[in-house]
Every structure is written in C-alpha cells, then in structure tokens.
Image: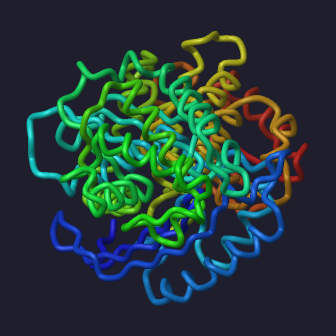
Amino acid sequence: MKTYDTLAAVDLGSNSFRLEVARVSGDQLYPLDSLKETVRLAGGLTSDKRLDEATQARALACLHRFGERLRGLSPEAIRCVGTSALRVAKNADEFIPKAEIALGHPIEIVAGREEARLIYLGVAHSLPASPDRRLVVDIGGGSTEFIIGQGLKPHERESLHMGCVNFSNRFFPGGVVDKAALKAAEVAARVEVERIAREFSRGNWQQAVGSSGTARALREILEQNGWSPHGISAAGLDQLRTQLVRAGHVEALDLAGLSRDRRPVIAGGFAIMAGIFAELDIERMEVAETAMREGILYDLLGRFHKQDMRGATVEEFMRRYHIDAQQAARVKRVARKLLAAAGRPLDEEGRDLLFLDWAARLHEIGLSVSHGGYHRHSGYILENADMPGFSRTEQARLALLARTQRGALVKVPEFAAASVSDGDRLLVWLLRQAVILCRSRAEPRLSDVQVEFNGKRIRLGLPEGWLARRPLTQRALDEEAVHWHAIGIKYVFG
C-alpha cells in the first residue's frame, strides 16, 4: 500500500464542520492547516428528523469551500466522516450525494461507538504517557461520547443522543434561560448518563478529560472568570449556573471567554456537562486540544502503516463467533485465484481486495445464529454489529457481500439494482464461486482456470473433465447461471 506525506480529515459534526491537514513524519502527525465553520447541522433537523433546506444550503456552501482546500491532495489520503446529525437525519441519503459532490470526496457515516473510538484516538495522542485509566468525555452538537481507556487503547465506549445543539433547542428555545429549564436540562442529562453510569463510574478511572468545543468553551469561561484555576471544576460549574440564571437569556450573558459562535449553544452544553459531573461524581476535568479529526488522521495513518483497526476487528470477530479459520482461509485463497485468472485488477489502492478478504473470512459468521439461511444472519450481524474501524458504509458493503454469497441474487434488491458497480458485482461473483468450490471444506485443485468478466457476461473456463468428476459442483454452477441470468448477466462455464 502507498504511503503519503500529507493527510487530511474532514469532521462533519452536528455543530461545526472541521478540516485538518497534517504532515506525516514516521508515526507522527504535524498540523499544517485547519478550517472550522459553524454549520449547526443538528439545529436544522425538523420535528420529523429531516434536514431543512436552509441548513443543507449552509452545509453545502461550507463543503464547497473545504473542497477547494483539498484539491491537489491524493484522494486516498483524505477521509471525511459524518456523525450524529447525519446518523439520525431521515433524508441523509438525499443530502450526502450532494455533499460529496460539493466536497469532491466520499463521506462516511460512523456509528456512535466508532465516533467514540476515533475521539479517544485523537485525544490519547495529545496527552502525556500515563499508566492511569482515563475517562474522555466529548460533548458534540448532537451526541456525547464517553470513553475509558489506557494509553492508546480504549476499553469502554458509549455514545448518548444528547448534544449542545439539540439540548439548547429543546430546553432553551429562543435562548431563554431560567432556573426551571436549567434544572430540567440537567436532570435530563443525568437520566441519560445513568444508563451508562455503572461502567463509567468514578472507580473505573483516575483522570477525567474533556474534548471538543463545549469542553474548551467551558474551560475558557471558568478560567477567564476566575472560577476554576485549571480546566473544568464542579465548583466552577456552580458559579456558571448562577450566572446563566441571573442573565435570563444567552444574549445577556456578559462573560469573559464566551465567543459569539458558542453563545447560542452554551446553555445546552453546560447542562450536559453539569449532569455528567453530578452523575459520574467528577470533581475536576482537564481539557484536551485534540479530538475526533486528529483521531481520523491517526486512524488513516495506521491503515498505511499496517495497523488497520479493521483488520484487528475481523480477527476479533472470527474468535468471538468461532468461525472456522481454515475454511475461511480456503475461501479467501480460491477467491484470489479466480481474481488472478480474471486478469482484471480491482482498485489501485487495494481496498476492494481488502473487502474480498474480509468477506471471505467472515462469510460464515451467521452460523453462530443458525445454519438455515446463515448468509442472511451473516449480513445482519455485519451490518448491525459494533465493528471498530468500520464506517456504516463499509459495514453495509461487507454485509452485502455476506448476504449475496449464496441463494437468489434477485432477492437482494440492493445488489440487483442497476446502480451496483461492476467492481462490486465481480466481488460478489468471486465470493460465491469460492464458497461453491470449497463446499466440501477442502481446497479444490484449480489449474488452467480462465475467467472473463465484463459486467454483462461471465465465463468460467475449467480444465476438460474437471466438472464431470464433480457432479455436485456441476449442479451448483447450473443453479448459479440461473441466478445471474435473473439479474441480466449471462454466466457460462465449462
């Protein structure tokens, strides 16, 4: 795999969009440039969870500007990640294609726990080495992530659907703040945190660290007003609570350290932080200067340095679900032999080959549920499980390969659709044939195999007499031809 001297991350947060460009030197990253725009994506969610037109326009304009900065960088050295607001928006499927055009790069939506992992990775790289277990709290615009980790390794990860934007809209409409609303917001935050309090309680960590905009804003306010000498303290939050109620409106707040951009969402962010402090018995919290975008960069760097978290996740799933490693290896080798026979390279960066290998290794994961229809169980697990390192889009692609490994292709509408690329059709064909050829759980002898694939026609050439000695395989391939014909692709073999 290639290496790059410059990497870029785009974090499409629910409050702000951020772009970070960094120079690579060995295993370290050094910032070169950063951009931030307050978009308030979560604030544009209507009552039926759809992004309104004004917010979409604001977001697209920002992404168009970010796209200009990314020009000239290798596409493989750029990763763009969407979070909470794009997870919940019902029209995200309509918005994301427009966003990708504006930015000029694909956008991945990550699950909450994967967002938490990336946040921890970014924070951990900026903190001094310590044997202590750290609690990292990241209050975003639409969600709050909690991580307990040690060194660079996260042990516990959770994501709760509460953020400074949605809490400000819910409890402080129009910016009005009173004692009752503030109490209701803090109680609501405590109720959410109570669900995870057992795993994240005070006895499970030695140091609390906050990250991202809300934590940094609260630190600035508390320090500049003399309410906390270093970081965020419970006593300092008590002082700020008094000032919020006294002001009665966010626009009436006269506080050193409170920026114009942060003012509309400070009450919601404060309420969440105060609820977290109370429920998890936190007295003091340090604040990191790094967060998810740095985590995205280090995760991307790891992929180029053979430290891809996705590979580690595949290994863990094989152990957890007791997958037959020998059979997985057979299917992987046969699929690769067929690919070599096709003489058709996949994408230049080898990402398609990674997915073929991962699918081969995990295709039998559904056997842990039931033998009957195990391919459907495999697809469900891979699409819905918490898979560190994988985006939702990547999990959906892996799930598609698993679901289509056997059976009628026409019954999988997302594969039968004309929009499926020839590359994905080839991956599905390779995995299906490998599964058929390894059905006896022994690796077939394949020599002088020929493969032709052009998207509309597939030909598998086998040595003379090979199929005559394998009537079961002959029948399976006859059925295969029918399945491919049903979606408009001619399949001949022999």
Residue 12 appears in the picture as rendered: no
Color theme of the render: rainbow
Quadrant of the rendering where the C terminus is positioned = top right
* Residue drawn at the location 66% of the way across and 28% of the way down: 380
Residue 344 appears in the picture as rendered: yes
Q: Nearer the viewer, residue 50 or 9?
A: 50
Q: Nearer the viewer, residue 433 or 366?
A: 366
* Residue drawn at the location 9% of the way across and 41% of the way down: 130
Image-based side of 103 in relation to 232, left or right: right
Measuring from the top left, give residue 296's x and y in whole percent. Answer: 39, 59
* Residue drawn at the location 43% of the way across and 83% of the way down: 73
Quarter residue 323 falls in: top left
The vertical placement of 197 against 391, above or below, is above
Image-based side of 155 in relation to 240, left or right: left
Measuring from the top left, give residue 23's x and y in whole percent. Answer: 26, 78
Measuring from the top left, give residue 203's x and y in whole percent. Answer: 23, 19
Image-based side of 121 in relation to 412, left or right: left
